[in-house]
Image (tube, grey):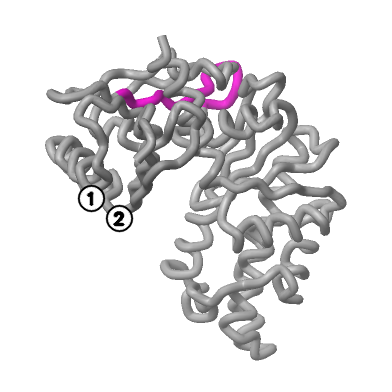
Amino acid sequence: MAHAFAALADWGTSNFRLWLVDAEGRVLAETQSPEGMGGLAREQYEGVLEGHLTALSAPADLPVMIAGMAGARTGWIEVPYLDAPAKLATVAEGAFRAPHAGREVYILPGVCQRAPLPYNVMRGEETQLAGAAAAGHADGLFCLPGTHSKWAELEGGTLTRFATIMTGELFDLLATKSILRLSVEASSPTTSANPDFIDGVATALEPGFAFTASLFSIRAAALLADLKPDAAAARLSGLLIGHEIAGIGRDMTIDRPVRLIGSARLTELYGKALEIAGHTSQVLDGSHLVRDGLFVAARLKFSS
């Protein structure tokens, strides 16, 4: 193996991913597992990390840079948030060293907003945004769709403000816990070409749209017009994503292509919804960006 410069870890709620990289950021080895923060006790983190490093034949003194939920209050060690505006290239200055007997292990902070901006937090997404900025996307509006979608504005590589919309979680709650569970097939895959999705987005973008008042119509359509469960899921998804984009459009300026960072399925849906709203979008590879953002942090921390 070529000489390794650092190990980079993206430690989320559900998953763990680790890369060994050289001094140019090239990947020498990698691994991933479902050993996310949500299933670990605090005393287990060191063992999990060392087990994966050993499996990749990492040198005993190789330093590690970690992003994500390992730095949350219920993670390995709580790393305080940095306040927005936050310069993404220097987020590593706020990293905390994890309790570890054998090597340097640092965990990156998240970013928060305080008054007068609406209170908000992110942990992990800022590293993807740092990777985007390092790749030349230092300005503009970014959308990271997911369980809790993030919308972020960057100016000159600085995260100036951001918003969180609980779209994915709301879909799950409405589709599995509310009256809509009787009509919606929550696991049904929705595509951007689905007419019910398109109609849901268009409806949500109409002036005066009332979100909560529209929801029961999905149940009623199943009873009165034989709306099928997969079509009901597509319409619910369209209403939620359209409502999200309409709200962001009132709060943030969408005057250039929105850069989408996320899974192929979600970026496809959000790209179509933005198109219906009259906007353009560009998809960026989130898995590469988080690694690039970690490398920016590792280079700052471990090159001195």
Above or below, comparing residue 7 to residue 304 in the picture: below
Which residue is more in the foreground, 220 or 45?
45
Q: In which quarter of the image is residue 141?
A: top right
Above or below, comparing residue 273 to residue 291 in the picture: below
Above or below, comparing residue 246 to residue 194 in the picture: above
Main SS of residues in magenta: loop
User: Can you identify the residue that label 2 sits on?
Assistant: 34
| Residue furthest to the top | 304
Residue at x 27% of width, y 45% of height: 56
Residue 134 visible in the shown view = yes
Which residue is more in the foreground, 193 or 236?
193
In percent of width and height, residue 228 lies at 61, 86
Quadrant where the image shows the N terminus: top left
What type is the residue that disc 2 sits on? Pro
In percent of width and height, residue 11 lies at 35, 41
| Residue furthest to the front | 2
User: Can you identify the residue that label 1 sits on?
Assistant: 39
What type is the residue that disc 1 sits on? Gly
Q: Is residue 300 inside the magenta stretch?
A: no
Which residue is more in the foreground, 249 or 86?
86
Tell me whether circle 1 and circle 2 mark residues in contact (CB < 8 Å): yes
| Residue 273 as seen in the image, left or right of residue 59 | right
Q: Quadrant of residue 66?
A: top left
Q: Is residue 113 inside the magenta stretch?
A: yes
Q: Which residues are drawn in magenta? A: 106-119
Residue at x 62% of width, y 67% of height: 236
Above or below, comparing residue 64 to residue 178 in the picture: above
